[in-house]
């Protein structure tokens, strides 16, 4: 049976009944073996003896690490594939709904803001007409008093000129729907770009080099972030010399001791 514009498949038809069983007894045995491999291994190198023991322990720890990874590998792989498949199915069903919601959110808010501006402009027009009518009445009253009470006539004219616009409130045209409300949601985009129909801004990485250069020339330094990925690549390639090329960074050797399995 159709449900609206789209027919949805029952969840039981797309969700696999998969069990990811991790036998507790095997996990405990694995944990015991791993803990046993820690025996006698120093955590600080303070002399040649602890240095030798630490270095000789690295292959043992690598083997223990490989055992743990191998134990969980098939289980993780099955779980990952199942999660990826289910997530893809979910996204496939959600995307048209979410896209349409974004479009309607934008359209509803745009219409309501336009209506609000129209009502405010209409209220100002009506208020201005009422003020003009009041001023016309005041001028007529002042003209009638000009000969007999000129001071009062001047006072009536002055009050009419200084009087503020009358308050005019037009009825709100917004449609009330339970669970739906509108509020401001300010976003931004880079100068020279425009958001798409879903209100999504073009990401920095998707801008052309020319666009990025122009925006950098406009933005204050406080809002510019270092390109950590690019810095890391230069440091890996040049080593300590990278610090002379890139002011503001210091290069140090963290060291890597490789252990082959």
Image (cartoon, helix red, strand yellow):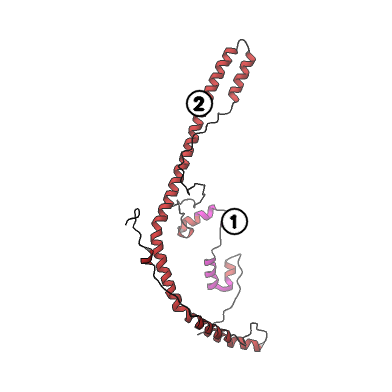
Write the residue at 43% across / 46% down: 107
Q: Residue at point 58% right, 16% down?
A: 142
Q: Is residue 259 visible?
A: no
| Location of residue 184 in the rendering, given as x and y in whole percent from the top left corner | 52, 47
- Which residue sits furthest left? 1
Q: Nearer the viewer, mark 2 or mark 1?
A: 2
CA distance separating discs 2 and 1: 50 Å
> Any mark on residue 157, and which?
none
The residue nearer to you, when weighing 7 against 109, is 7
Of 122 and 58, the residue lying toward us:
122
Q: Which residue is mark 2?
A: 129
Name which residue lies at 48% across and 58% down. Answer: 204
Is 2 on the left or on the right of 57, as rendered?
left
Which residue position holds label 1? 222
- In the figure, residue 7 lies in which quadrant? bottom left
Image height of 44 relative to 3, above or below:
below
Q: Which residues are magenta?
A: 214-241
Question: What residue occupies the far top of the structure in this picture?
Answer: 148
Q: SS for tag 2?
A: helix
Above or below, comparing residue 123 to residue 209 in the picture:
above
Whether residue 225 appears in magenta in the rendering, the answer is yes
Q: Is residue 194 magenta?
A: no
């Amino acid at each position: 049976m159709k449900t609206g514009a789209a027919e949805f498949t029952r969840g039981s038809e797309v969700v696999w009944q998969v069990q990811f069983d991790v036998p507790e007894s095997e996990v405990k045995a694995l944990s015991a073996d791993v803990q046993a491999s820690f025996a006698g291994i120093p955590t600080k190198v303070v002399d040649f003896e602890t240095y030798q023991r630490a270095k000789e322990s690295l292959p043992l720890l690598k083997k223990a690490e490989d055992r743990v990874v191998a134990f969980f590998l098939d289980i993780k792989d099955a779980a990952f594939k199942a999660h990826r498949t289910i997530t893809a199915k979910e996204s496939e069903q959600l995307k048209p709904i979410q896209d349409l919601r974004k479009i309607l959110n934008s359209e509803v808010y745009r219409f309501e803001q336009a209506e609000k501006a129209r009502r405010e402009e209409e209220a100002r027009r009506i208020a201005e007409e009422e003020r003009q009518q009041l001023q016309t009445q005041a001028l007529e009253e002042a003209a009638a008093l000009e000969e007999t009470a000129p001071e009062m006539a001047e006072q009536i004219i002055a009050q009419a000129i200084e009087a503020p616009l009358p308050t005019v409130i037009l009825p709100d045209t917004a449609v009330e729907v339970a669970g739906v409300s509108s509020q401001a949601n300010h976003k931004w985009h880079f100068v020279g770009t425009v958001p798409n129909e879903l209100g999504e801004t073009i990401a920095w990485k998707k801008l052309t080099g020319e666009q990025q250069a122009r925006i950098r020339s406009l933005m204050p330094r406080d809002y510019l972030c270092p390109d950590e990925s690019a810095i890391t690549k230069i440091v890996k390639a040049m080593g300590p010399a990278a610090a002379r090329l890139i002011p503001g960074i210091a290069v140090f050797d963290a060291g890597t001791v490789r252990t082959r399995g």
